[in-house]
Amino acid sequence: MDKESAVELPAAGDEVQTLLGALDRNRRTFAWKCSGLDAAQLQSRLAPSTMTLGGLMKHLALVEDDTFTRRLFDRELGEPWAAVDWDSDPDWEWRTAASDSPEELLALWEAAVRRSRAMVADVMSDGGLDRVGTFVWPDGRSTNLRRLVVDLIEEYARHTGHADLIRESIDGLVGEGAPAN
């Protein structure tokens, strides 16, 4: 995984260090669960689910971009997301991941993580965790960066659990944290 701007999870850090460290720990663990696999392995499934590690990588790349690009800054998503008709194909990222190589999936996910880190760094220097995003929900509410980071931690935690089960079924790799680098 790209180490650029990664934050370690401190034993006794402040709120920012703890939240961003927890997010990066989840990202590292997810990357570890998807590492070193070929295209067929990235498309492995556990019945009855159609979820794959490749689909998870593409989905989490979308979630990274959506969380900070759209929900924090209310900007349009870039490619490949901008060209998708989400109304007619709401599971596009899951469906199309099977056509992407492991290298393409990893590059897409790592680029999304880099963009997320850059946007979070910008906001940390301009309002920090309390900064409210410009996106407004239909009910008139907007979320702050703190809430978005917590939501992304939750998303990774849930999907890293899925990845853990799928990876164990492929080659027996188990564990709750990526090895220290």
Image (cartoon, rainbow, N blue to C red):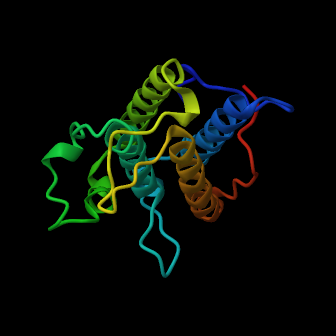
In this rendering, the count of numbered labels is 0
Determine the residue located farthest toward the right in the rendered image.
12
Q: Residue at x 40, y 44 (%)?
A: 61
Residue drawn at point x = 59 percent, y = 55 percent: 154
Q: Is residue 162 above or below residue 64?
A: below
* Vertical relation: 123 (above or below) 177: above
Residue 98: x %, y % from top left: 31, 57
Quick one: 74 or 152, which is closer to the camera? 74
Q: Where is residue 161 in the image (x, y as percent from the top left)?
A: 63, 61
Q: Quadrant of the C terminus?
A: top right
> Hey, which residue is sitting farthest bottom in the picture?
48
Taking depth in this image into account, of 128 and 49 the one nearest to the observer is 128
Please state if 114 lies on the left or on the right of 85 as rendered: right
Give the percent coordinates (x, y) of residue 165: 63, 64
The residue closer to the viewer here, 172 or 14, is 14
Q: Residue at horizontal 42%, vertical 27%?
A: 119
Q: In which quarter of the image is the N terminus?
A: top right
* Quadrant of res 73: top left
Please tell me which residue lies in front, 134 or 62.
134
User: In the drawing, does residue 74 fall left or right of residue 165?
Assistant: left
Residue drawn 63% across the image and 44% down it: 26
Corner quadrant of residue 158: bottom right
Position in image of residue 160 (x %, y %) = 60, 55
Task: Find the residue positioned furthest to the front.
Answer: 140
Left or right: 63, with 121 as reference point: left
